[in-house]
Image (cartoon, helix red, strand yellow):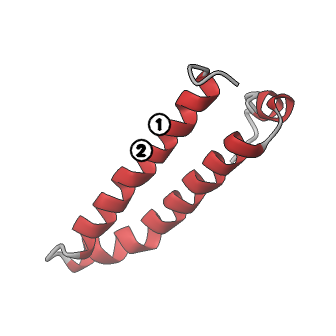
Amino acid sequence: MAKSSLRIEVCGEIDELNSHMGVVRTLASSCKNENVRESSEAVLPTIQNHLFDIGSFLACAPASAVAESMTLDSNAT
């Protein structure tokens, strides 16, 4: 797979987004507002885990599986 492929680019973008999420978690954990601290710890780890899963899937799955999973599904949650 070429380094310039869209799949490689998306993997890098997801990795960078996950990195930024880590910064947000760090900043939120030191926030003086207790509601911000609690709500961010309730949701941000889940988002990061999903980003790790997506990155892993894109890095490891065969191209046909990636293309199939990218089909829009209006019933998806």
Residue 62 position within the rendered picture, expressed as x and y whole percent measured from the top left: 83, 36
Q: Which residue is mark 2?
A: 16
Q: Secondary structure at mark 1?
A: helix
Residue density around tag 1, few if under 14, some if 14–19, many if 20 or more, within 10 Å: few
Q: Residue at x 44, y 52 (%)?
A: 18
Q: Is residue 57 left or right of residue 36?
A: right
Residue 21: mark in rendering: none
In which quadrant will I find the N terminus?
Answer: top right
Q: Is residue 51 above or below residue 61?
A: below
Residue type highlighted by circle 1: Glu
In the image, is 34 to the left or to the right of 4?
left
How far is mark 2 from mark 1, CA to CA?
5 Å
Give coordinates of residue 16: x percent, y percent.
41, 44
Q: Give the vertical position of 64 relative to 11 (above or below).
A: above
Mark 2 element type: helix
User: Which quadrant holds residue 66?
Assistant: top right
Which residue does the image show at 48% across and 46% down from the upper left? 15
Please report the residue visible at 14 percent of the width from the left and 77 percent of the height from the top: 32
Q: Residues within 10 Å of mark 2 (few under 14, many from 20)?
A: few
Amino acid type for the residue under numbered disc 2: Glu
**Which residue position holds label 1?**
13
Q: Residue furthest front?
A: 2
In percent of the image, x 27 and y 75: which residue is there? 29
How many numbered marks does the figure carry? 2
CB-based contact (under 8 Å), mark 2 and mark 1: yes
Residue 60: x and y in percent read 75, 45
Q: Is residue 29 left or right of residue 17?
A: left
In this orientation, which residue lies closer to the viewer: 9 or 75?
Answer: 9
